[in-house]
Amino acid sequence: MAELKHPIREAERYLKNAHDVLTEKAGKQGNYYTDPKYVKAAGNYAWNGVLVALDAVTDVRKSLRKGQRLDIKDYQNAVSKMDKKMNMPFLAAYESLHKALGYDGNPSYVIVQDALKQGKVIIDWANNHYNGN
């Protein structure tokens, strides 16, 4: 994977793309999005943004052996070592962005907006720990 010039800005761009997909394509009636395909896409964009931010401040990817896959517990352990208080927000972002949105396409506007906020919390935290330029 090529190194990004500023991975936190890239992570924020992923989150913006998630917002854009929801606004432009997901359709909304009342308190629900009408097209779960785009809710899933937005959840995946946002979750990938969280991972980009975490990769910038942890050594999770660097410690992988050839052919080894990443596991959520690897990220959880890395975040917990840096700041135990971020363990719950990290798990909330994982459960909401990756599972509820990315897999299930949960159409609830309230749940989607809360999930995006959870992602922003992790990205902002990573920004505070980022040592790059």
Image (cartoon, grey):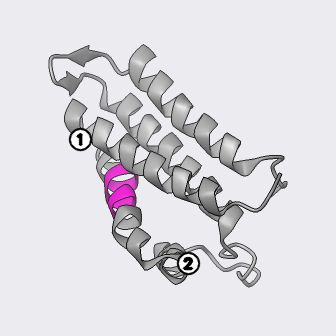
Badge 1 marks a residue whose secondary structure is: helix
First in sequence, mark 1 or 2: give its number: 2
Amino acid type assigned to the residue bearing label 1 in the image:
Ile
- In the rendered image, residue 77, in percent from the top left (x then y), is placed at 50, 82
Which residue is most to the front?
A: 128
Q: Give the range drawn in magenta.
A: 92-99
Vertical placement of residue 127 versus 20, above or below: below
Badge 2 marks a residue whose secondary structure is: helix
Residue 64: name its quadrant.
bottom right
Circle 2: is it few (<14), some (14-19), or many (20+) Cα within 10 Å? few
Task: Mark 1 vs mark 2: give the one in front.
Answer: 2
Task: Report which residue position mark 1 lands on.
Answer: 111
Residue located 40% across and 54% down the image: 98
Does 91 appear in magenta? no
Q: State whether residue 25 appears in this view.
A: no
Vertical placement of residue 130 versus 43, above or below: below
Residue 132: name its quadrant.
bottom right
How many numbered circles does the render carry?
2
- Give the Cα separation between the discs numbered 1 and 2: 28 Å
Task: Report which residue position mark 2 lands on.
Answer: 82
Vertical placement of residue 11 versus 30, above or below: below
Amino acid type assigned to the residue bearing label 2 in the image:
Met
- In the rendered image, residue 84, in percent from the top left (x then y), is placed at 43, 79
